[in-house]
């Protein structure tokens, strides 16, 4: 009888993510000024310290007045109003606007008491020094209401949000000069294999250039991680163990290669025999052989060596865990048939386009695990659940890359 494995095997994609999440340490917060926080993840929700706008104000340069006074205004029969003052951004008119009166007002300036509508300068003509003629009615829609964007005390950004330029602008408008963010994940990145050579070096027969480091480094960087490149380790248990020891305090080591069924797949042996394994093999294709475990307390995500597989497993399993945000998915019509095996979810490399009835996704052609050129054309992964089969024209779940 074959003894049961001492660790989970053939886990689902969801379980693989949960295992990775469970292995990662808790990170400290830090507080950063807005200009340093781009791309970081908020550690606490942000509440507004002011309302925005702070008061009813004008969306246009023009005059503010009582709307009812101006309803009859046309080009031929303009309405005449008396100008009783001026309201500028930062210097509001103190008085009240009465019937038949208006104040000159500028974009962003507080609406004076009594006025509730705006007529822009393009629709005005001066009629002597103290009067204006309106060629059309003033409109309430051109008043920006106090708090219409957000209100004092309202939560404007949720913990876990990735800080984009527009979110930094929002935080500033809400009165925050600095924000609490998580320290970025520190990730060591290692390629394994005797045959793997740094690009730019001469290539001997049987060798391949290290594409995994280039692709994974870029993905990690895009996801806000601090990457420590550890280069390449040959297929020897000693060299691999030395590489695992030399990671200098990273939160996670991401490696590629050496996790499948071969005799020289030593990363697998090291973690199984001398480390701890959280799981080996994921019910997904490509990327099935991936392995997760720890080496002296260091979490190690062993991605498969095949170039497409390593990038796809990272994107599907590791990305949502490291960013703390769900993958961006859409449902689109399939431009061709997609299927999966009974016991594996499939992630087809696809390209999103426009069909007669809206968005459509087609496969990029070559789906082999070493076909990087086809992957480079893909902007999406078509996710087909285990045992699934999708016909052209059906709706399918699409992960945007
Ligand atoms: N008998 C079986 N063989 C294989 C299975 C299996 O289930 N049974 N699984 C296959 C699948 S699926 C994959 S994926 C690969 C994964 O293998 P490893 O993770 O052990 O990776 P290696 O054997 O080290 O390399 C595989 C392939 O990838 C190339 N490679 C490796 N590292 C890099 C790199 N940094 N840059 C570019 N290319 C790289 C390597 O040269 C090999 O061609 O196993 C299958 N086999
Ligand atoms: O992950 Mo292997 O992904 O099918 O080549």
Image: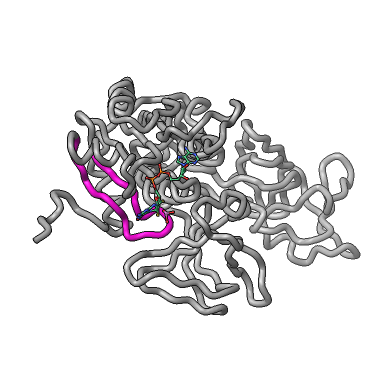
Where is residue 113 drawn, in percent x and y? 58, 46
Locate residue 116: give its quadrant.
Answer: bottom right
Residue 3 visible (yes or no): yes
Q: Is residue 292 above or below residue 378?
A: above
Main SS class of the magenta portion in the image: strand
Q: Decide if residue 119 is on the left or right side of residue 335.
A: right
Q: Decide if residue 131 is on the left or right side of residue 169.
A: right
Residue at the spot 41% in from the left edge and 52% down from the top edge: 316
Q: Is residue 261 above or below residue 92?
A: below
Q: Is residue 315 above or below residue 135?
A: above
Residue 178 visible (yes or no): no
Kindly give the residue lying farthest to the front in the view shown: 205
Q: Which residue is more in the foreground, 372 or 143?
A: 372
The span shown in magenta is 275-293
Residue at the spot 58% in from the left edge and 67% down from the top edge: 361
Where is residue 327 drawn, in percent x and y? 43, 53
Where is residue 196 drawn, in percent x and y? 48, 34
Q: Decide if residue 328 is on the left or right side of residue 16.
A: right
């Amino acid at each position: 009888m074959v003894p049961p494995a001492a660790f989970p095997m053939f886990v689902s994609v969801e379980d693989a993510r949960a295992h990775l999440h469970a292995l990662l340490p808790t990170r400290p917060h830090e507080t950063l000024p807005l200009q340093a926080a781009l791309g970081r993840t908020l550690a606490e929700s942000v509440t507004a310290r002011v309302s925005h706008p702070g008061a009813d104000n004008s969306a246009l340069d023009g005059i503010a007045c009582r709307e009812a006074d101006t309803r009859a205004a046309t080009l031929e029969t303009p309405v005449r109003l008396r100008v009783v003052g001026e309201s500028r951004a930062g210097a509001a008119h103190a008085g009240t606007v009465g019937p038949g009166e208006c104040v000159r007002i500028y974009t962003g300036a507080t609406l004076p008491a009594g006025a509730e509508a705006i007529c822009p300068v393009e629709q005005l003509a001066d009629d002597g020094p103290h009067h204006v003629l309106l060629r059309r009615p003033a409109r309430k829609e051109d008043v920006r209401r106090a708090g219409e964007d957000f209100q004092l005390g309202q939560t404007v950004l949720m913990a876990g949000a990735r800080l984009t330029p527009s979110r930094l602008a929002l935080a500033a408008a809400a009165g925050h000069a600095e924000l609490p963010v998580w320290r970025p994940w520190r990730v060591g990145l290692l390629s394994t294999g005797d045959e793997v050579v740094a690009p730019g070096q001469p290539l001997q027969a049987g060798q391949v250039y290290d594409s995994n480091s280039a692709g994974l480094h870029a993905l990690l960087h895009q996801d806000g991680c601090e990457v420590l490149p550890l280069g390449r380790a040959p297929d020897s248990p000693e060299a691999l163990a030395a590489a695992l020891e030399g990671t200098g305090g990273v939160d996670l080591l991401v490696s590629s290669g050496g996790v499948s069924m071969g005799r020289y797949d030593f990363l697998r042996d090291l973690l199984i025999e001398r480390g701890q394994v959280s799981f080996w093999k994921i019910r997904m294709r490509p990327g099935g052989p991936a392995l997760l475990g720890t080496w002296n307390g260091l979490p190690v995500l062993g991605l498969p060596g095949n170039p497409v597989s390593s990038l796809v497993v990272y994107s599907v399993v590791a990305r949502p865990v490291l960013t703390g945000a769900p993958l961006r998915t859409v449902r689109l019509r399939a431009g061709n048939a997609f299927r999966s095996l009974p016991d594996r979810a499939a992630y087809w490399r696809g390209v999103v386009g426009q069909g007669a009835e809206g968005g459509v996704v087609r496969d990029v052609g070559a789906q082999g695990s070493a076909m990087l050129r086809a992957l480079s054309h893909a902007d999406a992964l078509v996710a087909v659940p285990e045992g699934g089969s999708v016909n052209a024209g059906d709706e399918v779940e699409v992960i945007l890359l």
